Image (tube, rainbow, N blue to C red):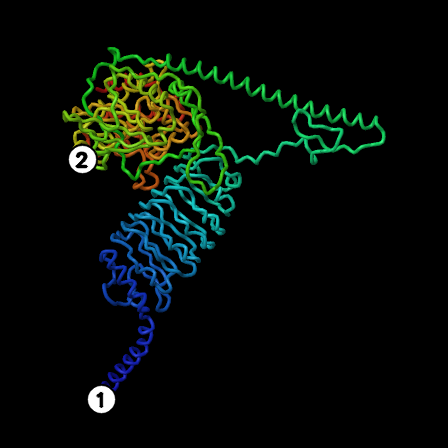
Amino acid sequence: MEHMKWEICIRVFLGLVLIQTMPSSVVALTDPTDVAAMNSLYVNLGYPPLQGWLLVGGDPCGLNWQGVSCVFSNITALNLSGANLGGQLGDSMQTFGSIIEIDLSNNHIGGNIPIHLPRLSGTCISLSNNQLTGVIPGGLASLSQLLELSLDNNHISGEISDAFQLLSSLTRLDLSGNNLTGQLSPSFGNLSSLSTLHLQNNRLTGTLDVLQDLPLQDLNIENNLFSGPIPAKLMSIPDFRNEGNPFNTTIIPSPPAPAPSFIASPPFSGPGVGNLANGPSLPPILYSHKAGKFLTTKRVVIGVAAGGILIFLALILCVLVRCVKARGDDKKAKSHDISAYKLPTENTRYSQYSLEEGLQMEKVPKEAIVKPLDGYGVDNNRMGTQMKNFCRHPPPPFFLGNKDDVNPVVPARVATHRLPVKSPNPSSVKVFTIASLQQYTNSFSEENCVGAGMLGSVYRAKLPDQKLLAVKKLDSTACRQQSDEEFLELVSNISEIRHANIVELVGYCAEHGQRLLVYEYFRNGTLHDALHTDDEIHQKLAWSVRIRVALGAARALEYLHEACQPPIVHHNFKCANLLLDEKLEVHVSDCGLAPLITSPSLAGHLLTAYGSSAPEFDSGCYTHQSDVYSFGVVMLELLTGRKAYDRSRPRGEQYLVRWAVPKLHDIDALSRMVDPSLNGAYTMKSLSRLADIISSCIHREPEFRPPISEIVQELLQMI
């Protein structure tokens, strides 16, 4: 009996405990609106394997769904960073009632950013390192209490929307690593609390004026197309990184003070002081009853006026003298350029490889196309001599016009007499018409576009005899760099570049304001494609083939640097400009186009973006030793199978040179960095020798890099 009493007491106690805990479970039930939002998000993400998540109903707060944080019955945070999520975000996120933090970074979420996001106080949103596309939604304007926004390392494109005018509480904004274009939105000026702004690795243009009054402590705008002078206020930011932009790095000057006027008061119309030679009227003179005083004053006034007129005439005379002298220098320079640019034909030293048919120009991903900024004039009369030494001088500051103007200002050409056109040698190149090239390329259709770069797009052309050609259609910005005469002179110079490892110009077209260059077509595409996208050709790139490719490319540079007089600097040497024929022999494209590339509106955008440029390029100088550096980067790509710049890799491995340099002299690390597809089919002696050559080419100081002829001899010993 006693035992029965104890058993009853225990059951009653357990019942009371159960009843006592039930109210807390009821309180923990999640707000139905948040539950519906979670269910919808789960569907949009593609039903990922997340602990506790359900398609319908459920209790995210009470049952501790993965990544969910709550306060009472309201979801306040969603943290699923690095959860291997896919799918899309959908439109359900705006229905969260109390959420203040959303972190879905480091996943594979695609689609567009939702137009509407949660409008709550103190919200922090991180969607970085995903696959998001589309544009930045204008709905951000409704998030007036947003504190942090991270959209970096996605595929967001287009111009930055004018959606920041109400985000005065925003302290951190990261839009880096996307495909954003255009100028900075004027609404950036309303971000009065912004301390951190990251915009690097985009294609943004224009000036930075809109940022100069923000309380920034961390500003990164590297690898964009920003131009113009840097506002002085930005130079005081503690962490300001601006490399990889075509800046005029001078500080914005103060407007000049107006010249002092000789006329201090309205002209006098009374008797006694006439108008001097129809010049400016003299100031009034108060008459005196003393004639001597009047005459003295009159002499002073006449003397001042006469002196002013003499000074004015002297200035006009100086200007006329300088104009006449400049015109004479231009004619002299023009005649010198034309005569100095006779390029040698290939001699026996460079005839070891036969030129195969075909060409495929820079075949780079369309999202990587850089739209160059055009805002400066270029001295076209110096195009010929520019090919001798490409030390780029800082461009002049922009003309400060209306900030609303988005079209670039192009200096008008002075209407003068036309110089006689120097036509290319008719025996070496063919003249095409626009009509014929339209027919051969199917009106320059998208399906025939095989690549695009900073100078324009490249199209595959099929002739009536079934022969394939590659047509490089220069865009309007590149066309504006030269007159018709200068373009024909450039074509003539290119047509004389002859070498077995250099792509030969077939013809050209210059009609109706358009300029096109016609080359042979290479079916195997670029070395960049072979290493990084074309698995079939990649498998054929054995160790010996890669050394032979490096040797052919080095021979091409040796011809440009040492056989041509004056020497030619390539200026855009990279894997995307190395074409492979059917025998996997290499042919270097874009030779002789440096006068277009070195214009201030185009120079260095792709080189900087893809990690191929030499360090001295940041100081505005590019010489033949800079080509050697870029050649070293190409050899690094051949060695490792990696891209010169790959933002999909961890931050410390994105720039190939930075990652590889410490490993080149460590035999164990060197073995681990070799392209795995080679399967160890190489000797350690050959690997070590190639590493030594690469190390010498990518030396930070140009004077310590070897001439390309020495590199050719080193590579010959490895064949």
SS under mark 2: helix
**268 vs 694: above or below:** below
Q: Residue furthest right?
A: 290
The quarter of the picture where the C terminus appears is top left
**Depth check, front residue: 78 or 384:** 384
**Depth check, front residue: 345 or 506:** 506
- The x, y position of residue 346, in whole percent, is 26, 13
Q: Amino acid at mark 2?
A: Asp
- The x, y position of residue 418, in whole percent, is 40, 19
Residue 535 numbered mark, or none: 2
- The x, y position of residue 377, in whole percent, is 44, 28
Q: Residue furthest front?
A: 271
Tell me: 54 left or right of 411. Answer: left
Query: How would you rate the neighbour count of disc 1 (Cα within 10 Å): few for under 14, some for 14-19, many for 20 or more?
Result: few
Tag count in the figure?
2
**268 vs 423: above or below:** below
Q: Amino acid at mark 1?
A: Met
Res 625 quadrant in image:
top left
Tell me: 311 left or right of 145. Answer: right
The quarter of the picture where the N terminus appears is bottom left
SS under mark 1: loop
For the residues marked 1 and 2, what is the alpha-carbon distance in whole angstroms? 84 Å
Residue 1 numbered mark, or none: 1
| Residue depicted at x 43% and y 32% | 410
Tell me: 529 left or right of 410. Answer: left
Query: Closer to the N terminus: mark 1 or mark 2?
Result: 1
